[in-house]
Structure formats: structure tokens, C-alpha cells
Amino acid sequence: MRRIRVAHVITRMGKGGAQENTFHTVCLANRDRYEVDLISGHTAHNEPSMEQTVRDAGIEIVRVKHLVRNPSPLNDLRAYNELLQIYRDRKYDIVHTHTSKAGYLGRMAAAKAGVPIIVHTPHGHIFFGYFNKLFTRFFTKLERDAALKSSKLIELTQRGVDQHLAEGVGTRDQWTSIFSGIDLAPFDEAIRARAATRQSLGVAPDEFLIGAVGRLEPVKGFSYFVRAARIVLDSMPSARFILAGDGAERESLEALAETLGPRFQFLGMRDDVPALMAAMDLCVVPSINEGMGRVILEAGAAGTPVVATNVGGIPEVVNETVTGLLVRPRDETGIASAVLSLAADRAQRERIGIAARDHVQKFSLARMVEKIETLYEDLIREKRLDA
């Protein structure tokens, strides 16, 4: 068998679940079988970035100068042409695109270049929570068109597959679900260091720490987390709140939380998410739209119960009342009620934490990469690329 040339294409390597997934898929690839490139636009200078992590792993980023996140017809056309040239020069057997912008331009260019196998992972969808109705219809049409160029489509959960099919994106035969894995190793040490981490955050032993982690963008729903904090504090003055992450909503969220004073702490970007998860008594995931919710797996790996919204693929990760509690999106009262319920029942929190930690063992990085490469091998045989 010859080595198969694979390109992973993503719009930018900012900090987020899609980027983590893509990085680990490249980093852990079977190098005896696959020669793998990572293709990306530049991460904005003011955006939290994984690029140093990529460089530290010895991975070169093949740059597409004009591949940018926001819609820009001129830049998008240039990025398409840049991708087309890269594909023709490097003669890939497989192009695997990630996220919406890189997914559309990357697949269209791959089809034009005659790449034999084209795979796409959207890492969620844009059907609600991102754009107005007109733009959503337009971008949904682009997804339908790009699906016609795809050999296989990968969603993180079966519910995500069903949501795409409901919008006419791809066929059932094209779709498969492969979870987004996480590195479980750092969480054991994080659990052992729980008391020290809480002390470093200024959290007293008798305080109940409720946290959240993610990009501070509207789709993540953190304004409802802040509003829920107000309700919780009225009933439980010993509660403390932390929010780790950065993004476009940072200032507005800080303004919303101003009256909560030191009880609500913004941590900014952190590289110690396992430690933060282990320090929490409870993690809240208030997303309006979510492909799967890697942060839920991270909480589970730390043995920390979650309160999460019943959206996207989250219900496939959170087993209601067993590994966490589910609430409606955009409902600060529901979030607060679930938080207070768990805060009042230590035995239930402990049961959920143990069950979540057991559940998350199946979401290892090695297993994720194995499933992706098994999919590649099926397509390689189908296309007779080893012949």
C-alpha cells in the first residue's frame, strides 16, 4: 500500500472545539499510512489562537492568505483560487474540510481540482443562532450545493446528521456520525489538584463554584448564564461564578455581570481547562446552538456535573439526570432552577459526576482518529486508490 496524501482544511486555527478536533486528527494520524497537511487561513491577531500549539507539535500550517471567517466575495474568490492551486500542486488523494467557510470553498476547489475523495465535517450547523433568516437560507443552499461534491459527510452526533437531512443537506448514505474526542490524561492530575486550583481562584472551601468555558459569542448563550447567576445568588449567597474564554461579547457580558461584583469572575482565555473543570462544583453550558459540546466531555472527565441546554447534539452527550441535567435554551430561570436543584443535593451531584466520568471514557482521541481513518480506508477501497 502506498502512502495516502491528505489535506485538512479549516478557516482558522482559533481556540474552539472544531479547531481542537482538527488539530488532533492531524497530530495523531497514522504517518505510516497517511501524509497529512493542515491548510488554514490566518487567525486574527486579537483572536485566541491554537497556532502556537500547532507549531509546538511540529505541524506546518499551509497558509491560504485570503481565507477569512466573515463573508467577503473578493477574498472568498481569491481563497478559492489559492486552494485550487494548492490542491493541484500537492496532488492530494483526500481533502477533508472543516467548518462552513473552509467547507464550502475547500470542497468546491477540491472538486474542480479532481481530488478523488472529499470529506467534510461541519462541526455543527448554521441553521439557527448565527444569521437572520435570509442569510440562513442562503448559507443553507451553499451547504446543499457543496454536499453534492462530497464523498462523505461527518457530524459529531446522530442528531446533527438528522438536522442536516431535515434541511436537505446531503443524503443519508453520505452521512455518518463520529464524535469529537478529548485528551483524558490531564484530568486525573487536575482532580488531585482541585483544592489548590480553588485556592488560586480565591474560592473558599465552603463556597459553591459554578463555572462555564467557551467562546464569548452570542451563539454560546453566556448572557443567560450571567442572568441565571443573579437568580442563584438571591437564593444561595455562597455561590461563586467563573467564566473562562474571550470573544466579541466580553464587554457586554462584563457590563451585565457588573452588579454581581466579585461573585462573578471573568478569567479570560485559559490554558488550564482541566484544572478549572475539576475545581468547579457544577459546569453550565448555555448554548443556543451546539454541534456536540466538547466542554461537556471535559466536565465529565473531571467528574463535574453539567447543566446544559437541550440543543443540537448535546442530548446525545448528556444523559438526562444520569450524567447531567438538560434545560431549554434562552431560559435563565430554567438554568438557575437546575443549578439550585443540584446544589441542594450533594448525593445526586456525586452520582452524576461518577456517571459522567465513566461515560466520557468512550470519547478518547485515539478512538475518534481510528473511526475517521476507518472511514478513509472504506473510501480508498471504493475509489481503488491502492490499485
Image: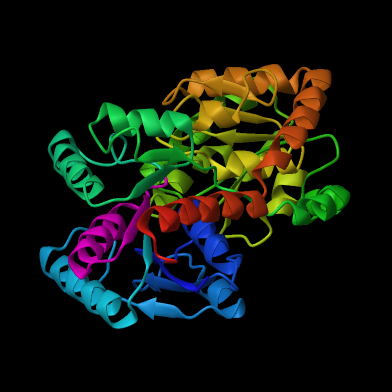
Which residue is at a point 34% across and 29% down the rendered structure image?
Answer: 163
| Residue 234 percent location from the top left of the image | 62, 22
Which residue is at the front of the view, 83 or 351?
Answer: 83
| Residue 290 percent location from the top left of the image | 44, 37
Q: Quadrant of the C terminus?
A: bottom left
Which residue is at the front of the view, 67 or 243?
Answer: 67
For residue 28, what is the image quadrant? bottom right
| Residue 219 percent location from the top left of the image | 38, 40
Q: Which residues are magenta?
A: 97-123
Does residue 130 appear left or right of residue 51 in this picture? left
Res. 263 in view: no
Which residue is at the front of the view, 382 or 82?
Answer: 382
For residue 10, what is the image quadrant? bottom left
Which residue is at a point 44% across and 66% down the rendered structure image?
Answer: 386
- Seen in the picture, residue 321 relative to 242 is either above or below; the reply is above
Res. 259 in view: yes
Does residue 128 appear left or right of residue 160 in this picture? left
| Residue 333 percent location from the top left of the image | 51, 19
Which residue is at a point 83% across and 50% down the rendered structure image?
Answer: 188
